[in-house]
Image: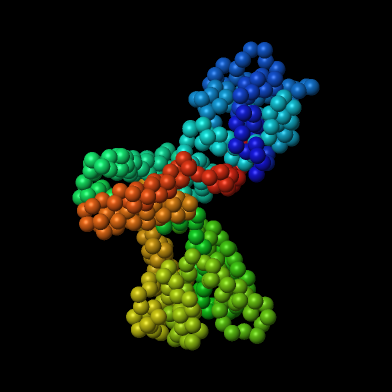
Amino acid sequence: MPSTFFSSSDTIVAIATPPGRGALGVIRLSGPDAHRIAGTLLGRSTPLEPRRATFARIRRSRSIDQVVATFFPGPASYTGQDLVELGAHGSPIVLRQIIDAAVAAGARLAEPGEFTLRAFLNGKIDLVQAEAVADLIDSVTPLQARAAFDQLEGTLTDAISAIDARLFDVIARLEASLDFPDEGYHFVDPGDLVRELDRILADTRALLRRAETGRLIREGLQVVIVGKPNVGKSTLFNTLAGAARAIVTAQPGTTRDLLTETIDLDGLKMTLVDTAGIRETHNEVEREGVLRARRAQDVADARILVLDGSEPLDAEDVAILLNDQNSRDLCVVNKVDVGSAWRAADVPALLGRPVVMMSLRTGEGVDALKPALLQALGVEAPERDPVRVTNARHIGLLTDCIESLARARAAVDMSGGAIPEEFVLDDLHDAREKLEQVRGRRAPDAVLQEIFSRFCIGK
């Protein structure tokens, strides 16, 4: 990352719309010379009126395009600086010419995420909201977009700020006690301290209780379908995908390679993987498919184990059930319309696991599949509570915060009422530092560079 990444003294320019052709393309300028450079591009002698869309022409040696220019004076802009947006026609050639003209007039090309970084550095948003911008752009399901927008609106920031304010109050009172050691003043009663720390711990843990669901919403998950040949894996794959993506025939061993499809499961982004039927085979191609199926199981977040309910279970079925049992496994017993050769209650390996009895041929039991899959994943009914932790960075920092708070709470208990302010304060300061890192108040430069480098250019 270049050293200019954190500099806000120059003026940056970038295309803010996705690559490719379109009806419109938007170019952004931000920085102290944004208005001057825009005036040079537009060939205007009069300044742009703030927050008023103005029709004009981009000129260099000749006219390049017709645009709509809008000037947002700082600090009341997205970046907190003077910002100009140029709405042009969406030709990549035209947009490139406008960028070249802006650079010739004194701007430099923006780094990925630099506009949002400037918004963060200028106090327009905190780091949680900045990360939510990227999440909102990358969202592919309505629930992902909802979770990201809630964080952009500041719901998680407000929840963390409320915890931080109470923690700051406790720290201030303990430090006041340290300022008067000879007088023996204590500005917080041990009982009150315990109760307040318990409340702070409870509120912080409440944020994390929904974190696993939140992480799945943000990042999605991979679910692999496994089973013997000809038990209905590919039909199940097509049913969940809502399209005939996998070839389905009566001949066993049709699937030889991994087939993937991304689906929306009640707001969860799920990458579904169809695999080769697991069995012993002398066919070299099929054997490679079985090997890939086993590898896919090792990296999957969850498995759907498909069994043929019309045939007696054999050693291969049992081996599939016992192989690397996952707490998120869902067992699907297919072909119940043909007849039942066994009962799930009589199979020890199925006890305690969610099981769905169905017929993919007739559709019997198919309606129960998605709710059962959500239950197996631990998100039986994804909440739409706006205060949700979705980011792995936030989860790690909040987990560390809770550990520090728990140590402080234990120190108070062990003191027998004689509050050891120094020891308690050390852990409380550590807990507060973690909260501030979530919001970016103490985020190291390396963390900021890593976060914003994942943004698209122009955002």
Q: Residue visible at 51% across and 70% down?
A: 225
Q: Nearer the viewer, residue 81 or 55?
A: 81
Quadrant that contains the N terminus? top right
Residue 365 location in percent, x, y?
A: 39, 68
Q: Image quarter for residue 286?
A: bottom right
Q: Which residue sits furthest right?
A: 61
Name of the residue lying farthest toward the front: 182
Q: Quadrant of residue 50?
A: top right
Residue at figure coordinates x 48%, y 33% from the top left: 123
Position of the C terminus, as image quadrant, is top right
Report whether residue 382 is seen: no
**Residue at image coords 65%, 32%:** 13
Describe residue 44's horizontal placement relative to residue 115 as left or right.
right
Which color scheme is applied? rainbow
> How many numbered dots are placed on residues in this image?
0
Measured from the top left, where is residue 75 in percent x and y?
51, 25
In the rendered image, is residue 456 in sight?
yes
Percent x, y for residue 425? 34, 48
Q: Write the residue at 43% across / 80% down.
A: 309
Horizontal arrangement in the rendering, residue 189 relative to residue 450 (left or right) = left
In the image, residue 239 sits, relative to residue 117, either above or below, namely below
Asked if residue 428 is positioned above or below residue 329 in the image, the reply reads: above
Q: Position of residue 377 (x, y in %)?
A: 42, 63
Instruction: Reply above or below: 459 against 323.
Output: above
